[in-house]
Amino acid sequence: MAEAHQAVGFEFTVIPEGADAQLSHQALTEIYLSAVNSWKKCIIRIKNSVIRGVYPASPFSWLFVVIAILATMYTRSDPSMGLIAKIQENLPRLGCRNIHDVTQCKVLLSAVIFSTMLWLLLIFTMRLCLKQLLSYHRWMFEPHGKMSTTTKVWALVRIFSGRKPRLYSYQASLPNLPVPAVKDTVKRYLESVRPLMDDAQYEHVTKLAAEFESSLGNRLQWYLKLKALWVTNYVSDWWEEYVYLRGRNPIMVNSNYYVMDFLYVTPTPIQAARAGNTIYAMLLYRCKLNKEEIKPVGSALGTFPCCSYQFERMFNTCRIPGTLTDTIQHWKDSDFIVVYHKGRYFQLYVYQDGRLLCPREIEFQIQRILDDPSPASKGEARLGALTAGDRIPWAKARAKHFNSGINKKSLDCIEKAAFFVTLDDEEQSIVGDNLGESLDCYIKSLLHGKCYNRWFDKSFSVVFYKNGKSGLNGEHSWGDAPVLTHLWEYTLATECFQLGYNAEGHCKGEVDASLAEPQKLNWEISSECEEQISQSLEVAQALANDVDMHVVVFRDFGKAKVKKCRVNPDAFIQIALQLAYYRDQKRFSLTYESSMTRLFREGRTETVRSCTNESCAFIRALEGGEVRRRLFRTASEKHQRLCRMASTGAGIDRHLFCLYVVSKCLGVESPFLKELESEAWRLSSSHIPYQMIDLFDTVNHPEYLCYGGGFGPVTDDGYGVCYLMLGGDVLTLHISCKNSCPDTVSSVKVITWNSNEIQLLPSLPMFL
């Protein structure tokens, strides 16, 4: 009641003459501070729009051009070749009586107008040059240490890229994703499936491909090229819609992924303190994001910028369920987070009087939630299971039970929050003799938890365990894992190396005693809704129990040794996975490896089909007792080339996917595309690189590194593998499969390279 009383802005006193309303000082102060905060954000947005709009130039360069033109005119030269005089003739008459003053004003105004036009022309030219330079990708295919003359000219990108770029500075200059030729895609597809088929199967598919290429393929391609002329990226919107948002199965395990904490160190064992620093660091990142002060993520040692579009929906975003398709809802700003603890949901405001709460204050508020003795209301404790089950029941329940009243208000609070926080009442320890078992339990908890103590629809949820460990659970539709791990790297580095903790393990700073308590959200859950929650929980628990997870931290060698042998580390790991799968299943499998296409505007991912003729030839030779270094290098080079082709828009699967969507829209059937639909990715892999390694002191504090994350298996009879190469000596692999599949086993063999031969290391345990 006290909090409700403080929220009232007017005090009413009833007198015989009527109602006398007196404005409270507190309400006026809050309104004023809100207005100031809103104006500040508006000014920041306008400022960023101007800076972004003139990049790679700067707003101050306009003044330089004006001064240069005026200085040239002062020397009685005409840099405009008569254009200033033309502009002067068309200017309206000014209201000055002195003819000399009128002439001088017109000359000055004409010079400013000409300078502005020249400045805009220079910006347009620089952007055009930058876009052409960013469209050049041949440098990726040149041998190491050998640079062609064309690539040397391309290096001018450093000149045209401008100074101090902001997060979205390059967006307008990034090229559009090209549409590959049908014949090229078909050719590459046939090459990719050759090692997986016998002669009869391959001949059948070749005939289907030839028929498709000569007939229906050209018709579908025409529509695809037409789309490419109208939109920024011909793949991304359909990929988001049909691959993610239209999926009706649970997104928990099937789509969401997790990211781990530090492996060998816990900055503080105090749960509230860890939450205080982490939440504060994330909100600092959001402030930088809103001000566009984060440097654009780049490839090729930072020379080549990547698209930053996905960063826009990182915060204040939620996936909204629908019966046919889900939608992604993003709000411009949110000044609160939602915290879950022991079946209860709390709204925690992270700003007071227009300022961000300090870490110690956030810790204080989190501790209030931990100490709150109030019980969960009827049906509230397992409410989050709705987001973990099938999408259609959740959509119907949302429309029926959460579309009005107190339920709608509380649900809106969760969905509009900056992000979701779970204060887990369990401990996740990763020390002791049972390191493998404890790690497996830890990552399973991050992936699905209890199936009701996460809000899987939020863009991401932060999990804090009772003993101070933490981690992330990310929703996949709004963006890909490298975008979220960029935030996580910044958060971990800021938390430990900048904010720190005091001697007792608490956050630093002082607490404002006037902080209002976090507000517990209220619900009115009917018996019918409770029944639906139970059904969703049953589906989610069956899925969670079926997932088998394992983490391997491999320290015998790492990226440094692989590079010393002049082998691409990613190719090395992929060939090792091919060998492991072959020894496990006695066959080769269609293999999915994600590769980013963010060199293009609004690009997301492309598939690298890692199982190639070359890798299979090497594995057969190795299994036959013959060690073939040449075959290994050939397979490695082929894989590296496939990765580069995927990154530069010459992949296979996204093009075929879009052709398939067009065929469905036209209502036509293609035997060739139908053949693609039946393919199963039994080995799905991903590599998440460190993007801000400079924030970590790996020399003095090598233990302060995040050990990656993972995801569930893509198929019921397959494996999911996510790997991360840390520094030069550590390789981390996250493996998943399903217990219900009799063909998956809990052992793996990985290859390594030494100075004499490639040998098998059977001592590396993994679920593959």
Image (cartoon, rainbow, N blue to C red):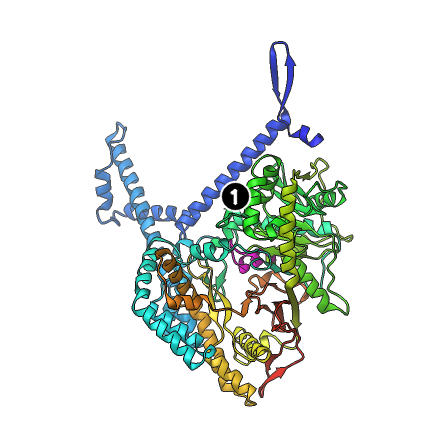
Q: Position of residue 759 (x, y in %)?
A: 60, 85
Determine which residue is flagged by label 1.
331
Q: Name the residue nearer the viewer: 363 or 625.
A: 625
Quarter holding residue 677: bottom left
Quarter holding residue 336: top right
Work out which quarter of the rendered image holds the N terminus and state it: top right
Q: Is residue 106 left or right of residue 512?
A: left
Quarter holding residue 132: bottom left
Whether residue 70 appears in this view of the structure is no
Our reading of the magenta stretch's main secondary structure is helix
Q: Position of residue 609 (x, y in %)?
A: 47, 71
- Picture layout, residue 458 above or below residue 103: below
Q: Name the residue nearer the viewer: 583 or 3.
A: 583
| Residues drawn in magenta | 476-488
- Picture layout, residue 179 above or below residue 72: below
Identify the amino acid type marked 1. Answer: Trp
Whether residue 686 appears in this view of the structure is yes
At x 41% / y 75%, what residue is drawn? 142
At x 72% / y 67%, what residue is drawn? 437
Q: Is residue 378 left or right of residue 638?
A: right
Q: Position of residue 287 (x, y in %)?
A: 56, 47
Q: Name the residue nearer the viewer: 707 or 81.
A: 707
